[in-house]
Image (spheres, helix red, strand yellow):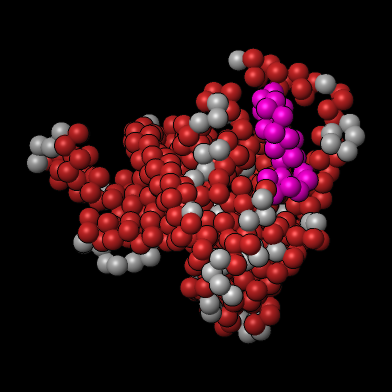
Amino acid sequence: MNAISGAYEWLATGANWQGERGVWHRLAEHLYFSGVCLLISCLIALPLALWLGHLGKGGALAVNLSNVGRAIPTLAVLVLLTLTPLGRYGDVPTLIALVLFAVPPLLTNAYVGMREVDRSVVEAARGMGMSGWQLFARVELPLAYPMVMVGIRSAAVQVVATATLAAMAGEGGLGRIITAGFSLQNTPQVVAGAFLVAVLALLVEGLLALAARLFDPMRGRPGAAR
Amino acid sequence: MSARDCLTTNEWICGEYVTSRSQELVDATLQHIAITAAAVAIGVAVALPLALLARRWRALAGPVLGITTVLYSVPSLAMFSLLLPLFGLSAALVVTGLVLYSLTILVRNILIGLRSVPEEVREAARGMGYGPLRRLWEVELPLALPALLAGVRITTVATVALTTVGAIVGHGGLGTLILDGLDTSFKAQVLTASVLCVLLALAADAALLLVQRLLTPWTRPSRAGRSARASRAPRPAVEKAAEAV
């Protein structure tokens, strides 16, 4: 497999890591962009999903949104947005696309998590005289937490993947190493870039899984989350 | 505004484009359908034995589900790029990548379906002298069918969308038109191909829903996944499978 050894050589060459088109700069672009978009998506989707889940309304919307999200090709959205007048503002099309695809998993999982809280527990909390807000903060949210975190993990993986695709529409990030490799017909560079992207995606998922476990409000109590 | 104009003025919606390039559109759509169908068919053929193995030896279930989940986390552009040394710029590369993605949901759903077969039903079949193969074919698989078909629906819709990324190696069906349209800023081509791609996903979903109803008339009409959820299987599995996009 000379492509593998070629990719290894590409990665071992210091020059490929330096400068405007180097790995470090592309990685910084990728992480910064993904992070900002994930934050925006959480700010939009989580309050809405938790509120709807608390009220028990809008379930069909929350679940169907995910199904619709799956049917829409990310690449098409990126290219369409790039060709609109928005394309003149550099990063804006990518930003919109990233947020658009991160919202459905966040919304669906958080909503489902809220609705899955044992009804008898909710009734008991109400019987103890908890207000709606107390019920949400002390009962529903801690119990829905695992599902909310699953949503954040799927959204993060989705965002990293979409940011990679943005390179096909001419944006920066790690995907650019891959697309540049294709246009140069440089297979080692393509494989090296793909390896970096794959490792990044798995790292993000792994770290978030770890964080979810560390910050679980039910940690160390009986009935803690799986 | 004559129809001729919309090509020169580069409008988003252009009847002239559709009529003048109809052959190109049909070819791209057919390629898109072929790649998707091949990927889903091979995906089912690979996922079924994997699910059976995972059920037979419980120790295998964890690793099988773990590996397929890891595969799902790899961004599509990276997945196709990593397969490049093995396949070169070919449709086989795109199909292989899509098969690897489809395994996550398919294996999970087939396992859920198989596990939803009540123990007493399997006992009864055994008592009637059914061998393991006949039991699988005549009892377990039919009962697992609703969950399997739900998985096939989810996978097919996702595969239609993912096929577009195959444009990076020149085998992305409608995706190839979308990417070419970007290079030439050809708005009508990008929009038409994108809309066709979404319509294709919706049509595939509707067609599979029909198949599902015909093959499993005993299940009440329900949303994909509910049939699997009705079993006592841990519910998040379906949701999670459905989630990972």
Depth order, front residue of A113/A214? A113
Residue A90 in the image: x percent, y percent? 80, 56
Magenta-tinted stretch: A167-191
Q: Quarter-wise, where is residue B114 in the image?
A: top left
Secondary structure that dominates the magenta span = helix
Residue visible at 48% across and 57% down in the picture: B20
B5, B187: nearer the viewer? B5
- The image shows residue B143 at horizontal and vertical percentages of 25, 51
The answer to whether residue B96 is above or below residue A52 is above
Q: Residue at x 85, y 30 (%)?
A: A17
Instruction: Give me the residue at 59% from left, 23% from top.
Output: B85
Q: Position of residue A178 (x, y in %)?
A: 70, 35
> Does residue B153 appear to the left or right of B179 in the view shown?
left
- Residue at the far right in the pictured view: A19
* Residue A169 within the magenta-colored segment of the rendering: yes
Q: Is B147 contained in the magenta span?
A: no
Compared with B225, B31 (above or below) is above
Query: Does residue A216 appear anywhere in the picture?
Result: no
